[in-house]
Amino acid sequence: MLEPLADEYVQADHDDPALLFTAAYNAFSGPVFGYLKARGVDDPEAVTQDVFLALYPKLETLHGGLQGAKTLLFTIAHARLVDHYRKRERTPDSTPYEADFDTRRSPSAEEQAFGRASGLGVTELLEDLTEDYREVLALRVVADLSVEETADIMGKSQGSVKQLQRRALGALKKRALLRNGTS
Amino acid sequence: MSEYTAPGRGNDQQAIDSLLADAGLEGSTDLRSELLELRSLADTAPIPSEAVRALMAGGAMVTRPAAVTPQVPAPEQIPATDELAARRWKKRRAAIAGLAVAVSLAGGATAAAASEGGIPGAFQHLGAAIGSVVSQLAPGAGNAPQPAAPAGSTPEPGPAHQDSQPAVVSGQASPSPADPGNPDGTPHAEPHPATPGNPSQDPKSPSHPDPGKRVLPTAPSLPVTPPEIDPSKLDPSKLGPSDIPVPVPSQLIPPVPEAPKVPAK
């Protein structure tokens, strides 16, 4: 088990990149992993490791301590996500048939129970939303970023992000009502 | 297990409530539960890989010496750099090779044009050089006066063919010019005009020594006037009748009888 470092310790010794890197991993590896998982990356765990490996060389010039590392981490993760989607668009889908991924089969009660417990159901809900809606919900809810940080990462104004967030929540509410009514 | 439960952020419900309040959806319990479920995705953190663990500080997490730490991301970056450099070098290499070939061709053409005799002369020199080299490498076939034709590649005609040849070719046998590719006058490459029996010395003679397929020489045309009389100095007015007897027919052809006269009545 990793030992999380206190913010005060990190702020006092932020000149040591190894300490800041350890603190950043302990604090944000979960949100980065959840963000990538919510966005449907094939191997979110490996991409999380890549994101942190890409963070380390930039710690020398990083300002803002742990909070600055958080913004930089999700900027890198967003870029990796864009790369992932572009790569997936270029390569044909050659996934072999697996019964677990067949959407025509109905899940059993056990699968439904464990699936909802592990958060698989909400990712299916997000798949029905548009790209911007999924991105703003993943950054605001899973990554716990502020409106300003979300606007910086998405390249939009804060007003656009608030508007997107409102519409995305409305769309998610409709999906949630539909799913709870049918299941 | 490659994942572990990350330390909780504590104020999940407060964050969701404020988010719903900003959007004007405070009373939506279904949406709140969905958002809490979505937020729980961040509670599971992956176990750091070996490369990430090597960069971390702390005794439990650092498995490699600290001196190695800055070098860990280097192996992941070096192949990309090398691949890019190799790709660029591959593109440049084709252009450099093409340029080198064009420059060498231009230099060769310039040298050939500047040499004595122009480009055909250069080819002649080249053929002569090849012929001399071949003749030196194959001393048994040194009689070939043509520099471009490798003497050792074709079978030499046997003595039986040479015996039957002089009657046919002797009229046209002429000494071939000196071998331009052999200026030093080595004995095996010199022409031998005294031996007309050697078919290889005649450049116009067929290469195949078969007598049945040999081309017969054309007969010299006979002069109309004797060689001692110059036709341009003859005066036609002074020419008298020739002393050569004119053949006279021995049998006279009877004349055609005239039309019979009809007696007058």
Image (cartoon, coloured by chain):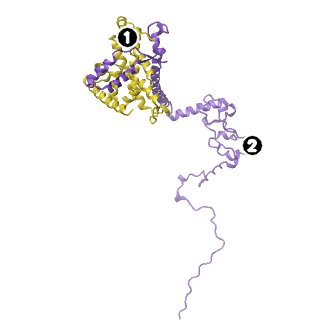
Chain colours: A yellow, B purple
Closer to the camera in the image, B4 or B105:
B4
Task: Tell me the kind of residue under disc 2.
Answer: Ala
Residue A79's x, y, as percent?
37, 23
Q: Chain of mark 1?
A: A
Q: Tell me the residue at 31%/28% (across/down).
A: A168
What SS does tag 2 mark?
helix
Closer to the camera in the image, A89 or A2:
A2
Q: Are marks 1 and 2 on the same chain?
A: no
Q: Chain of mark 2?
A: B
What SS does tag 1 mark?
helix
- Which image quarter: residue A74? top left
Q: Tell me the residue at 47%/15% (across/down).
A: B51
Task: Tell me the kind of residue under disc 1.
Answer: Glu
The answer to whether residue A22 is left or right of residue A98 is left
Q: Residue A57, can we see it?
A: no
Residue at the disc numbered 1: A60
Residue B44's x, y, as percent?
42, 18
The answer to whether residue B230 is left or right of residue A163 is right
Residue at the disc numbered 2: B160
The answer to whether residue A41 is left or right of residue B223 is left
Outermost residue on the right side: it is B160
Question: Could you give the CA–CA distance between mark 1 and mark 2, rounded to whole angstroms?
Answer: 97 Å
